[in-house]
Amino acid sequence: MKKILSLLVASILLASCGTKNEESYFIPKDAVGVMYVNLKSLSEKSKALDMKNLNINTLIKDKAPKEIKDFVSEFMTSENLNNTFRKEFILGFGSIKRLSGFGGLALPIKDASAFETFITPMLNKIPNLEKETNVGKDNNFTIYSTKELAIGWNNKTALIIGAKNYAAAELIDLTNLDRQETILATNYFDNFFDTNQDIGLHITSSPLGDALDGILSAFAGMNINLENNNLSYYSSFEDDNVHSATKLKLNNDIKSLVGYDKWMTTSYNKKLLNVLPSNPVMLTKLSVDTETIYEHILSLKDNKSLPISIREELKKNTKRANRELEKDLGMDTQDFSKIFTGTVILTANKNDSPENKSPNIYTAIAIKDKAKFDRFFNALKEKKSRIKEISKNYYQLDEDILMVVTDDLIFMTNDGNKADEVKNSGKLAKNLSDFKHIDKLSHSLYFYSKGDFNSIVSKLYKTNQYNRSSRYTSFDNYDDFNSFSRGRKKNPIDNITDKSAELYEKYFEENHFYMDINGAESFITTKGDKNSLIQTILYGDEIAKLTSEKN
């Protein structure tokens, strides 16, 4: 039955459309999580999709259990769905009530008769259902239920509720909510519910705060307010990209513990770009203020939101860390925090060498105080005998890792040619300063990749298999291992790893993710002349086929 309910919701998403949120009146104010799905926008964006030619149809016909086959063929037709459901929003929620959880979905329906006709064949497959009629608000609801599941409806809305116990009673309570008891009375819902987005999710700590503030104070000695921490997530399928955004709002107590609004920064030394190759297949950039992180950690010793035991342990650990650093490096933790600016940029490029299957990795770390770095690195060299000095400021850290040190930065790579060029010229002739998305480096955290990166991940997976197998078997080289792999029976993961990267490159082009103090955003750009929703569905459909071929 759970499979059928999941399929029901998925099919409604593709078959419906909508503009209202009347179902909000059935979502309780104390919900920890609330989600909505914009059926109208998803329907409009998927209308050019030929559902009949999807691989999933063949998979259901050939491999699905009989109950799923019957359900799809008899009930999940576009005509049935359009005759049953109103063209509006699906809302879902999860709530913690009396320290036990319950949640569910509110579905927009055209009328009670249409929904009853639609749902009755499914209800007939659930044993030991109890039926109640003329219950709930205005005695307008019909409910079928077990102890843990209840399905009820009036003339406008169908509710599917899951609970640990008394699911029918929970459903009836929802139908009797006054407006001030619903999410419409919260301080976040109006701003959260954005009808221009395809999907929205909101998580709030306030209900948890009501339940846990006193417990934490009494048993853990924490004087902390857990209420009014809110996270909102949105996703929308645009013409040429899938766009997601996350917004985070924390209360002052939580902010004082995390302190990210102080130590997250956006600035970076642009000289880092000069030593990194152009046209990367992957890039990650992080900017934090290491001195401010140190100062924030120190401030926690006096933060009364924390229990005394934690504050006292923090004082002891800080003193211990200072003693050990003084002994090993001749500097304390404050001096250590001043060595680097806190900006790191890491990139990857394909390695086309037939002898080496690993990608070329490049890392640039900005130095703030060269004198302090020299003290730190000289002490490190004395303890790490594997560090080999090739020439002044040029080192071999491991068998495949080279490091060049300048007054402004550290450059590390497994690419000997690029390491030599940076050592000799101080920069690369073709470097990252002409990166086409250079504006996005202004974010505190930025991650970028393009389709080729997935092929690199696939190669790394196979190289890891080779390395693990080489411990127990004898292969002269990676190609010998590949020949062995082709001769053995492969499991589904092998096949997915081989082919999924190719499929990803077929449908998607670039990934962008960035994060700052107030939240994060991501863009996944798509290829082809169809919008991103259709391309995503087609990609998922091919992945489903690929997975099924080895099952």
Image (cartoon, rainbow, N blue to C red):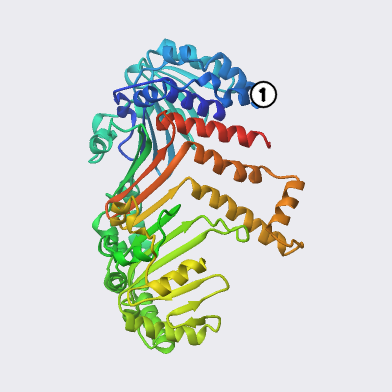
Viewer-nearest residue: 284 or 62: 284
Viewer-nearest residue: 11 or 101: 11
Q: Is residue 148 visible?
A: no
Relative image position of residue 540 (x, y in whole percent): 52, 34
Please tell me which residue is depicted at 40% across the width and 17% down the height of the picture: 85
Query: Residue 421 is drawn in which quadrant?
Result: bottom left
Viewer-nearest residue: 550 or 488: 488
Query: Residue 138 is drawn in which quadrant?
Result: top left
Above or below 68: residue 206: below
The residue carrying mark 1 is: 62
Q: Is residue 540 visible?
A: yes
Could you tell whether 58 is left or right of 234 in the image?
right
Could you tell whether 452 is left or right of 28 in the image?
right
Which image quadrant: the C terminus? top right
Could you tell whether 149 is left or right of 157 in the image?
right
Q: Amino acid at mark 1?
A: Asp
Q: Tell me if mark 1 has few (under 14), some (14-19) or many (20+) residues whose alpha carbon lies within 10 angstroms of its own.
A: few
Viewer-nearest residue: 86 or 487: 487
Above or below 441: residue 90: above
